[in-house]
Amino acid sequence: MLRTMYRSENAKNAGAYARLKFAMDYWCALWFWPIDKADLLPSRSEFLNDMYMILVGLYSTNSDSQQLSMLEDADEEDTDILLQVNLDELCALLPRLRLARTIAQQNHFMHWELEFADVFAERGGFDLMIGNPPWIKIEWNEQGVLADANPMFAVKKLTATQTTHERQTALENAHTHSMYFAEYEMLSGEQNFLNAVQNYPALKGQQTNLFKCFLPLSWEKTNESGIAAFVHPEGVYDDPKGGALMVSFDTISNLYDAKSIVECYQGEASAPIPGIKDANGDWNITGHPDRIIHVTQRELEVFAKLFDGNDKWPQARLPVLHVRSLIGALSCIASQTQYISDIKTEIFGSEMWHETNAQKDGTMVRNVHFPESLTDMIISGPHIAVANPCFKTSRSICRLNSDYDNIDLTSISDSYLQRCNYQPYCAPEEYEERAPLTPWNCKNYYSYRIAMRNMFNQGGEQTLMSAIIPPKVGHVHAVYELGFKNDVDTALMSGLMESIPYDFYIKATGKGSGGIGVLGGLPIIRSIYSIRIILTTLLLNSLNEYYAPLWKKCWNVVWPFTTWSKSDPRLSPARFTSLTSEWTWDTPLRTDYERRQALVEIDVLTAMALGMTLQQLKTIYRIQFPVLQSYEADTWYDANGRIIFTNNRSLTGVGFTRPEWENAGAVQPIKRGDAPWDGIMKHAPAGYVFARTITDDTMPGGPVQRTIEYAAPFDRCDREQDYETAWKFFEEKYKE
């Protein structure tokens, strides 16, 4: 039955299915035509004549001018005879059609509407298409093909010139020659077919990857209510040339279980919106309707402006958003009037010294040491954290990223510089000459810069780890620097980049590393809040005397009249009233509690400057920063503002251990209060003091024994509550 009705093998008169399939196969075969059979390629008229022969039954073995008549004079019986066509005989008579059939048999062409004609006729397409398509780029790998004949091409790393020379020798073998051109023809055919706008118009301009072909294909072959589900990389939505794939669709990010999809579409909208991680720190697989983000032109316009810096919404990249409500926050960022990418002549970015190459060319040398001056200092990623250029110091033996110790900012001197792993190796004049040049023809070497860890930890506490570094400080390429022509702009942008809203933008990009291409989308906001943001930024970053010139340059006479947004004994008003234009050791914020509160206020001020609402800020924090939430929930401060216990992995060695913190009798106080106590340190009331003796090797001349005292009571902070308090304070302060 199959052979008779469908394949029509040896059939005197081929069935409609067989004729139509052969015609469609013939069209596909043109993309895969062998090089040595180019003379058989049909002209346009020959192709149309061949199609007529296949579909109608008239054929000519000669030229167009020698065709049979169009049956105008034929009677009914003659017509029936003439309209009959034996496909096998037709291919036997015509080499071109015979070759087309061979190509079709080799490539197994699939014609969906023909193979599933009943599905398309009755339902308009499939209800469901699901799969895991191959993630394979269609690329010509000459060395890989030749390696099948001669392993030398795979074992040796041949240059292009060497490959060309060896290829000539290899192709002298008849078998290798045949295999080489067969592979080339097949791959070229696939590339041409998949890249053809006639076949995949939605993929125009993109690099061919097989999984991409499945996406527009599935949309074409499903009916109006059909669903297509494929396992594939997110990169297709980041491709600036992939706009045609983004018409109107739903997207759900951070999926780790199939049941989440069902819950997203069937769940109760009134239920609490789950974050990225649950209370145990595991990936949250709970679905919610708000996790479904329906993308239309309006959303694409926001994404295009924000992530591509243009209005070409059909080509917009898709950000990684956990809940629908975050689009409003992104819209606030997209509504700004100026971005870093807009002032290219007034900014510069650099990785400065490549950790390997700079050692090879003698620019720097590995030497774990305490720098004697700024010029002698080359920092690495772990040295800095959010708003803290003195976050950690290298250990005397530093081989791993874990070989760093936290610095107690209350114990460092005016001129303190942390231990680092590298120092300049060439002459000072040569070292300076090799330093990057800014667009305004100055060495970055002489500027205050925003330094950040070049690799973004999307799953960490925060993604954008940045701080201000002083002039003459170098860094390896694991640190990326961003500098501004105007130092005041450097201070302002540093504060904005240290905020949760700006970190949220970086998270939304989904990028794993920085550079001006990513940072260029950050807005530059000069607002009524700028003076306060600059002050708070400098109080956090200006930790030693090397920031004194920046402090003086940015000085504003209103700073001494500043007050905290929150009332707490650990937040002294004198912190501001004592400020002058001259930097002193007491100028910066040094206690853990003060510094945390300053970052909270920067978050609120930045959100206000962007035009966000308090709810949007809280949503960003609650949804996008699960690790920071977990740290906040279990970080405890003493009465003097020092961290006594924390689960923060970046603060290993800070405070007491969990057994000491939570077990009765584990640590005895050095001073007791009058109130009763159950022996558990975390429950100690006011009046109790505990001491911890450590070996401190973070200072020159160390290691030394140092005793730290912690005064009860101990408490935690609620960041969302602090956001509300600060928001109300600043809203009232700046209402005019």
Image: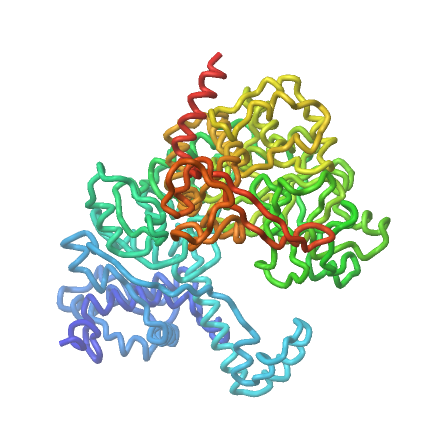
Q: Residue at x 46, y 73 (%)?
A: 34
Q: Residue at x 67, y 35 (%)?
A: 484
- Residue 105: % across, % down: 33, 75
Using residue 716 as the reference point, say whether residue 558 is left or right of it: right
Using residue 296 as the reference point, say whether residue 346 is left or right of it: right
- Would residue 65 be seen by someone viewing this image from the given angle? no
Q: Quadrant of residue 26?
A: bottom left
Front residue of this view, candidates 323 and 544: 544
| The residue positioned farthest toward the front in the image shown | 674
Q: How many marks?
A: 0
- Residue 648: % across, % down: 47, 49
Front residue of this view, candidates 84 and 518: 518
Q: Quadrant of residue 629?
A: top left
- Residue 587: % across, % down: 66, 30
Residue 492 against residue 213 in the figure, above or below:
above
Front residue of this view, candidates 597 and 275: 597
Residue 264 against residue 302 in the figure, above or below:
below
| The residue positioned farthest toward the top in the image shown | 736
Q: Residue at x 54, y 71 (%)?
A: 141
- Residue 532: % across, % down: 57, 24
Using residue 258 as the reference point, say whether residue 627 is left or right of it: right
Identify the image quadrant of the N terminus.
bottom left
Front residue of this view, candidates 573 and 16: 573
